Image (spheres, helix red, strand yellow):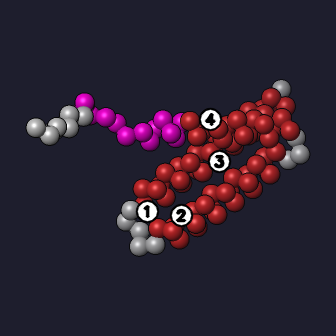
Amino acid sequence: MNEMLALALAWLAGALLGAMFFGGLWWTVAMSASSGRPALLFFCSMLLRTGMALAGFYFVGGGDWQRLVLCVLGFVMARLAVTWLTVPQKTGPAPEASHAP
């Protein structure tokens, strides 16, 4: 049972890493419009998010391929969740474009 708990925690850690990574990406894109230096914002965000994800994979995996696979699975599932949660809601049908006479 101890092994199952370790695998479940590895999946949970991957989901948290993914939520931080993709949530941070969403935040970066949202903030880039009002930023004076959007390129610097994107670069620093990429370095921070990638560094956190790689360090998390390294520590959670700990040399065990099963924990690493479950961590990556949680990461990918978090990507799907963040993508689903951040989709803009449509309020109705788009108006038709006017055509030339």
Residue tagged by mark 1?
32
User: Distance from label 2 to label 1 (Cα)?
Assistant: 8 Å
Residue tagged by mark 3?
17
Residue type at numbered disc 1? Ser
* Pointer 3 with pointer 4, Cβ within 8 A: no
- Please provide percent x and percent y for residue 101: 10, 38
Magenta-highlighted residues: 81-93
* Pointer 2 with pointer 1, Cβ within 8 A: yes
User: For the residue carrying disc 1, how many other residues have a C-alpha within 10 Å: few (<14), some (14-19), or many (20+)?
Assistant: some
SS at mark 2 in the image: helix
Residue name at image x 76 percent, y 49 percent: 57
Residue tagged by mark 2?
42
Residue, far front: 101
User: Distance from label 1 to label 4 (Cα)?
Assistant: 26 Å
Q: State the predominant SS element of the stretch in magenta.
A: loop
SS at mark 4 in the image: helix
Residue tagged by mark 4?
77
SS at mark 1 in the image: helix
The residue nearer to you, when weighing 94 against 58, is 94
